Amino acid sequence: MSERITLFVDVLLPLAVKGSFTYRVPVELNDEVGVGKRVVVNFGKSKLYTALIVKIHHQAPAEYTAKYINTVLDNKPVVLPVQLNFWNWISNYYMCSMGEVMAAALPSGLKLNSETRLCLNQDYDGDTDKLTDKEFLLFEALQANNELTLQDIVQIVEQKNVYSIIRSMFDKRVVLIEEELKERYKPVYETYIDLNKQFASEEAMKLLMNQLEKKAFKQLQVVIKYLSFCKFPETQPANKKEILKGNDDLNSALSALIKKNVFEVFKLEASRLKSYDATHAIKELSDVQQNALTQIQNNFEDKEVVLLHGVTSSGKTEIYIKLIEEVINKGEQVLFLLPEIALTSQIINRLRAVFGNQVGVYHSKFNEQERVEIWNKVLDAAEFEIAEYKVILGARSALFLPFTKLGLIIIDEEHETSYKQHDPAPRYHARDAALYLANLHKTKVLLGSATPSFESYYKATNNKFGLVQIAERYRGIELPEIKIVNVSDETKQKTMHSHFSSVVLDTLKLTLENKEQAILFQNRRGFAPLLECEVCAWTPSCKNCDVSLSYHKAVNVLRCHYCGYTEKVPSTCAACGSASVQYKGFGTEKIEDELSIFLPEVKVERMDLDSTRSRFAYQRIIQNFEEGQTDVLVGTQMVTKGLDFDNVSLVVILNADSLLNFPDFRAFERAYQLMEQVSGRAGRKNKRGKVIIQTRKPDHFVIEQLLTHNYQALFNVQMNEREKYHYPPFYNLIKLTLKHKDIDALNYCANLFTERLRAELGERVLGPEFPGVNKVRNYHLKEVLIKLEKDISQSKVKQFIRWQIDNAFQEKEFKSLIVQADVDPV
């Protein structure tokens, strides 16, 4: 036992509160506390939270009396010092609290929740005459069960709102309300059996088997089955489920052997995660791929980051696999980031075929139990030298895993906006955060894309990153033929069939006749963007947001894509009463619906946010398409991101203009990336594919560059524009979003706050202005954009902005204002 000295700990709470909080350590827990361990603390009047120790010291806080921590939850740290350094950088760079970073970083299973419970007040006099019928029901239930959760109470009284009943019983001193901390992560255990040592000799085993052969043949079968799992006389625990697999009738025989003490029974913690075997050898690289790999390795000698710019289907994944093999052979870990969960099902199969159980997956579609298990396996990988989880494949949240020997970070499709977290804070960009994480681990980063972000490509061409380029597809397969269809011309000629040109329908029919598949891309989900009255132009709009409601035919409702609000579809106009209410525009659901009208035999599946809400929806849709059960895949941006299908010969972009007309300085870059990426899904293996782009602007500059796959020309023009108008990569951006439920109060606060910023930062401050959607979830919005030169101290500017925000909140007028900072918005 250590000396009985008074210790204090500074802890983080997973809340949007500034800084850490100091708690006192009970002397009996002095030996148990440690940086990176979780503790239970009281915060506020009665709430219990999981907190994380970040510092141990002897200094009591001067401003308040430190409360005691309740208990220490961990035997060893679950968060490492290098992770805390990473969290601190994210907090400072992205202008958020460490608590918000902690909330994003830790899987929910490692954060405990405070759950309200009711128990009987032992001092209650037992007089039930003053209780209502429902209160008496609860009183009886509490006598039988000692305590009840809110969910229990709802079921007993058969009503959803039970707070009034609880408050009444509390006021009558019948019950007490207590907060109990519940650990969310519960390990899973499986039953194992092991041979009793007295039967471990050949003589004893022979005698046992002779006895069983005469009197209990089924028991003999169990013993033989057990011996098949071990090399007798060496014994080892065997899983009970494996012993009984396919022979449930042996269960009673096994129970009898346990009673006879032939077998000992015990439980071991089991994994929720599936096991995989490596089934394929690593492929030999082509000369082009090998040359690219050699260039990457050479660049890594003097560059920390390398950009691999390879056209679609150039074989980047095989290069990644070679690099992963090198890192694993050195006993180090690899982090492989992907922008979308949808991509993991294909890539994970390719990696597991080569590396088996060394590959782990981590993303938000896993339940909280699985996420904790993966977290612990990554944490244990170095300490116990286990082979599992040397490669972690995941979306942006995988950055926060507790790596101990990180040897390489691969960021595939590095240009994707999905790497940016928008809400809630921290609003980090996984690509940029990964660069700092690599710096902490002294490791390298490989960025991969067929259409790199202009910021990354600018750094590569200016020698900050290494640059490796692959200009041809694997095995020399040609890039797809691109055909532009002028929608205006087809409309005049009356050859448009709803939203399909005659060229699209004719080519689609031919594709299906040839037993080939097609992908149709429409960058909007739902059936129709809006309903409109043909008499007075009224459109149904969201009651919480400043947007029109989109029609979703599958559930026959109007839905807001910002807050989720839904309404029934009106039969008449709410403004003039007319019955002439028509659908305007089209989304993926309408495309799916109309294809079956024009091509009755076609098998169509849709991949968008609505169709992939369930956990395994991605895998099911992709698997159906891979196996040829689906002819046409209709989708939003999900279908553009690195998916690889052998039999796709046609890709159709149904409305290119919606991409080109977007009001954003990155609109042309994004439009090119999306159309080039979705085009790359065509003709990837056996033959040259075809891409059809429907547009009313066939002569648009971006369309012209797309026809020749001329990324460089678009990049050059855009760099001139961005330098002239002070945009990235020449300037850094900080966007401040101000929110208030009162529009007048918002205008007043936004103007005053912006004046204060402008007094120090001058013309770098633009706004305040209303955004395109200026009301979301009943909050009115205004935005302030700050453009900062590269040579100005970014950290000092951020400190100044934070100081202004903190000062403003001290004033009465700003009390109900919300200010959100978004550094490097996308």
Image: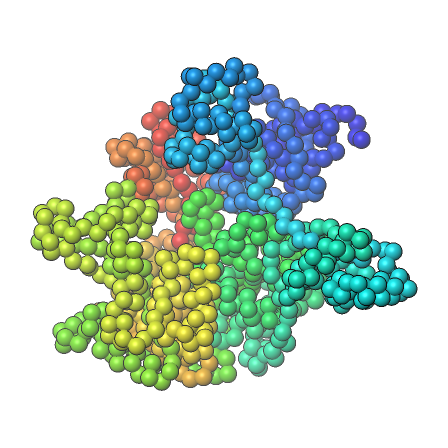
Q: Position of residue 736 (x, y in %)?
A: 38, 42
Q: Quick check: 390 left or right of 173?
A: right
What residue lies at 33% left-to-right and 84% top-to-bottom? 513
Q: Quadrant of residue 27?
A: top right
| Residue closest to the eye, 195 or 607 | 195
Q: Quadrant of residue 102?
A: top right
What residue lies at 46% left-to-right and 21% top-to-bottom? 170
| Residue closest to the eye, 730 or 601 | 601
What residue lies at 48% left-to-right and 45% top-to-bottom? 426
Q: Position of residue 70 (x, y in %)?
A: 63, 29
| Residue closest to the eye, 210 or 550 | 210
Q: Quick check: 262 left or right of 586?
A: right
Quadrant where the N terminus lies?
A: top right
Q: How is the image coloured?
A: rainbow
What residue lies at 11% left-to-right and 56% top-to-bottom? 580
Q: Residue furthest front?
A: 215
Viewer can see residue 234: no
Q: Quadrant of residue 727?
A: bottom left
Residue 387 vertical position relative to residue 21 in the rendered view, above or below: below
Q: Position of residue 165 (x, y in %)?
A: 41, 26
Q: Quick check: 489 left or right of 563?
A: left
Q: Position of residue 541 (x, y in %)?
A: 22, 47
Viewer can see residue 616: yes
Residue 371 vertical position relative to residue 452 in the rendered view, above or below: above
